Image (spheres, rainbow, N blue to C red):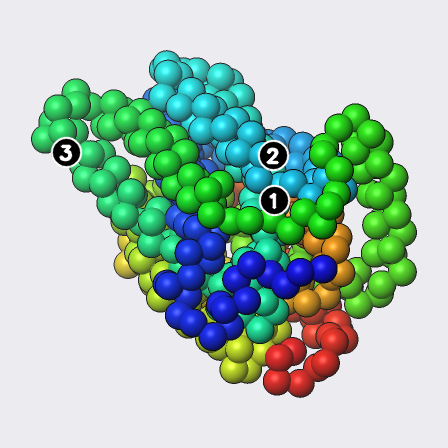
Amino acid sequence: MPPPQSGPAAHQPLWRNRPVLAWAFYDWANSAYSLLVVTAFVPLMLGGFWNDGAASPVTTFRLGVGNGIASAVVVLLAPLLGAMTDRAGRRKPWLAAFTGLGVLATAGLAAVGPGGWMLALFCFVLGSIGFFAANSLYDALLIDVAPPQAWDRVSALGYALGYLGSALLFVLSIAMLAQPERFGLASAVDSTRLSFLMVAVWWALFTVPLLLWVRERRDGRAALSGSSLRAGFRQLYRTLQAVRGQPQLLRFLVAYWLYIDGVYTIIKMAVDYGLSQGLSSTEVTGAILITNFIGFPAAIGFGLLGERLGARRGIYLALAVYILATSAAVSMKTAADFYVLAISIGLVQGGVQSLSRSLYARLIPVESRGEYFGFYNMMGKFSSIVGPVLAGTAALVSGSQRIGILSILLLFAAGLWLLSRVRLPAEGATA
């Protein structure tokens, strides 16, 4: 098997390595969807313009169900898609197809009218399926663009660029939201609709470098076909059996499922939670912006920390901060409290994601990394079913969003404990 195309990544600055930058800029591209659509504007619009008069706990429940449906589809799709693309040795065409689905669905959100929460959720679910499925293929390409000794840095670079790029677009969107007339827009709703279109264009435009400059290791494999689909099912079954026979890998996946559930639930429900506690949309979106700008240098710092102290120790640190921040969120009373929490999360959010990805890459066979990364994303998205739906249901039953957030503490603590029980290859400085 030939070495990764970017072997020099271990020796030259990352910003001079075109395939590495092209790969990392896909995070710059699709993180705009994650921040502006998933985290900010869909929750705002569901509770406002798209709402049909429902109370706040009901809109929280609807948001949780929408996130849960999208995640359930990806749970079923991601490992099979990984097996099929491993078989064919081609991931970029499918990445382009799912990116196209996400782009079109995001643009469709701009056309939803007042009270149209059902159509909005339909577009949101389609967009999220495109986002998550494409992201599982993107993760698998990490092994194509860098050698193992550079995975922590390259993975962190992707998350860092994602935070920076999405934050820049978010600044423009917030400016339009605050003063729509300065941009020739009639209202804040028109500003939000235009933001959906901007995300669609941004996502499509910055996907182009990856499609042009990232080369896959084909290894002489066959083109994707009906036989590849059947073979994919067989390979998926074999991988299921193989994962069951690798206790350390299985233990890591369960640990990841638990703690990333908490991470994704906070990302997806933060705006809704802030609004439910009486904060204004300006205060909430400002806090989210702080999180992303801090996340840019912090993610790079965690990449260096992973190389120095080990990826697992970096994850330990990030999860400890999450536990403290989640505990503090329950007693949050003011916008200042929310900003402090945003800063805390911004310091560790990219770190726990990027180091989990690079740590997992060390546990899997390279020749089947598409399928194994499909499992990785499946675990993350399966947790995204449980967390948002759990938080939404708890809010609906209790009538208080503060009750729902308490459940996240258990997920962080259990994931942290189980991660400590994973025995890693060549444990020591890189563990």
Task: Give the distance between the C-alpha atoms of the residues marked 2 and 1, in whole angstroms.
Answer: 8 Å
Q: Nearer the viewer, residue 295 or 146?
A: 146
Q: Residue at x 16, y 20 (%)?
A: 186
Q: Nearer the viewer, mark 3 or mark 1?
A: 1
Q: Earlier in the sequence, mark 3 or mark 1?
A: 1
Q: Distance of mark 3 from mark 1, alpha carbons?
A: 39 Å
Foreground: 131 or 335? Answer: 131
Residue under circle 2? 94
Locate residue 173 relative to residue 31 in the image: left or right. Answer: left
Amino acid type, label 2: Trp
What is the spatial separation of the Cα atoms under label 2 and label 3, in whole angstroms? 39 Å
Indicate whether 215 appears above or below 189. below
Under mark 1, the amino acid is: Leu
Q: Position of residue 211 (x, y in %)?
A: 49, 41
Q: Which residue is mark 1?
A: 137
- Residue positioned most to the bottom: 428
Q: Local crowd at mark 1 within 10 Å, few (<14), some, or many (≥20)?
A: many
Q: How many marks?
A: 3
Whether the residues at callouts 2 and 1 have beta carbons within 8 Å, the answer is yes
Residue 75 screen position, x and y as percent: 70, 39
| Residue named by callout 3 | 179
Residue drawn at x 75%, y 38% as measured from the top left: 222
Instruction: Give the residue type at disc 3.
Output: Gln
